[in-house]
Image (cartoon, grey):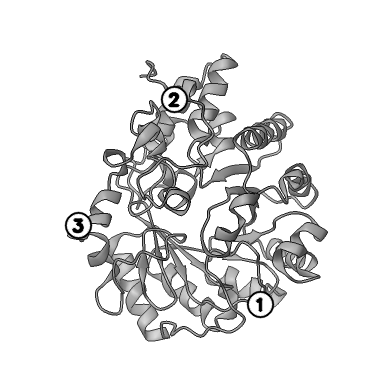
Amino acid sequence: MIGISKLYCGTVEPSDALRYGRRSKDLPSHLLQFSADKKPVVVWNVTRACNLKCIHCYAHAVEKSHEKELTGDQARVLIDDLADFGVPVLLFSGGEPLVRQDLVELASYAVGKGMRAVISTNGTLITKEKAEELKEVGLSYVGVSLDGLEQVNDRFRGKKGAYRQALTGIKNCQEVGLKVGLRFTINRMNQNEVPLIFDLLEEYDIPRVCFYHLVYAGRGSELVEEDLSHEETRQVVDLIMDRTKDLHERGLAKEVLTVDNHADGPYLYQRMLKEKDPRAGEVLKLLQMNEGNSSGRGIGCISWDGTVHADQFWRHESFGNVLDRPFSKIWTDLSNPLMAKLKDKRKHVKGRCSTCQWLDICGGNFRVRAEAVSGDIWAPDPACYLTDEEIKESDHS
């Protein structure tokens, strides 16, 4: 996760994170990525069921869940363990998390245990009443997935009317004072929608947007050919930075992030060097604190049946099940060779990744994408768009 507005526009400085000792339990949410202990943010797919059928769904969500989901009692045992382990954020996802009838109760329980609870949703089921319930239990944030404006989004979602229903859900959150933002997955079918998403932020006064690079997992594994070329990716990232800067200069406070391609960090830093931005050195420090991809370390995933994964995209690799052992035990058990290697991927990556000057701030990028294309977990991430010249060793200490 690269905070474009934080880094490029200077809304965060290294001293902000240092003031809290860089401890996950103490850091406010906007500084959590700069923690030193990297206690995992946990994505919990509470159900596989979904009322939509998105063409790029990493979870292969289905209309009705055929998998055994954790019961309410099992879920509370899980939440107790996550809280005791120091998990700072529990992200309820799916499928569509709001399909699960006890979601509000589970979110309330997590908040009561001291965690920040957030949800990732398609937004279509957020009625006024549901928004009020989520606000009342202390939910921190609602991330609504939109992959373009009406025509494009509805094609992605597999349902006409999904866009308008999602906008209604966003408005319902806003009316009760519940923080809400957008999630957008970039690919060739919607790259031209990126400027329109920025327009939407202004029109609806939405404070946050996360632009996700495509990950080849779930139904998204069928869209490899729809991923952007390296040059197209550079153009889109430049556009995101340009539009974010424009918002900042006009006094419109929007948080803009890119997710799932940590080449964005060094690319942003090198752009700032070219622009002779005096904050470039401070940005490098923040990127070093961020440490790049954190699958298996600073982010983890629990599936609807209790299976533990390194992240929400790596569903074909399991480290155990919370019904057999607590998540905290599974996460810290380094007898599993893959789990041990994921704690520091930099020692194991191959090819151009192994000699890249940005390895410490990229963390080797996405191993799932590398494996999907090459069959080798430790091969270079094919979505890294930095040139061979840009990754050559130089002095940036």
Residue name at image x 53 percent, y 55 percent: 216
- Give the vertical position of 95 relative to 251 (above or below): below
Q: Is residue 76 visible?
A: yes
Q: CA distance from mark 2 to mark 3?
A: 31 Å
Where does the image place residue 142, in percent across and percent down from the top left? 60, 62
Residue 220: quadrant of the picture: bottom right
Between 43 and 278, the one nearer to me in the picture: 43
Ranked by sequence position, the earlier of labels 2 and 3 is: 3
Name the amino acid, label 3: Leu
Name the amino acid, label 1: Asn
Where does the image place residue 191, in percent across and percent down from the top left? 71, 45
Where does the image place residue 270, in percent across and percent down from the top left? 52, 22
SS type, badge 3: loop
For label 2, count other residues whose C-alpha is less than 10 Å away and answer few (under 14), some (14-19) or many (20+): some
SS type, badge 2: helix
Residue 51 numbered mark, or none: 1
Residue 178: quadrant of the picture: bottom right
Name the amino acid, label 2: Ile
Residue 119: quadrant of the picture: bottom right
Where does the image place residue 26, in percent across and percent down from the top left? 36, 49
Task: Say which residue label 3 marks.
Answer: 334
- Horizontal side of 34 relative to 213 (left or right) equals left
Task: Say which residue label 2 marks.
Answer: 391
Q: Is residue 186 visible?
A: no
Residue name at image x 59 percent, y 68 percent: 135
How many numbered circles does the render carry? 3
For label 1, count other residues whose C-alpha is less than 10 Å away and answer few (under 14), some (14-19) or many (20+): many
Between 391 and 136, the one nearer to me in the picture: 391
- Horizontal side of 244 relative to 163 (left or right) equals left
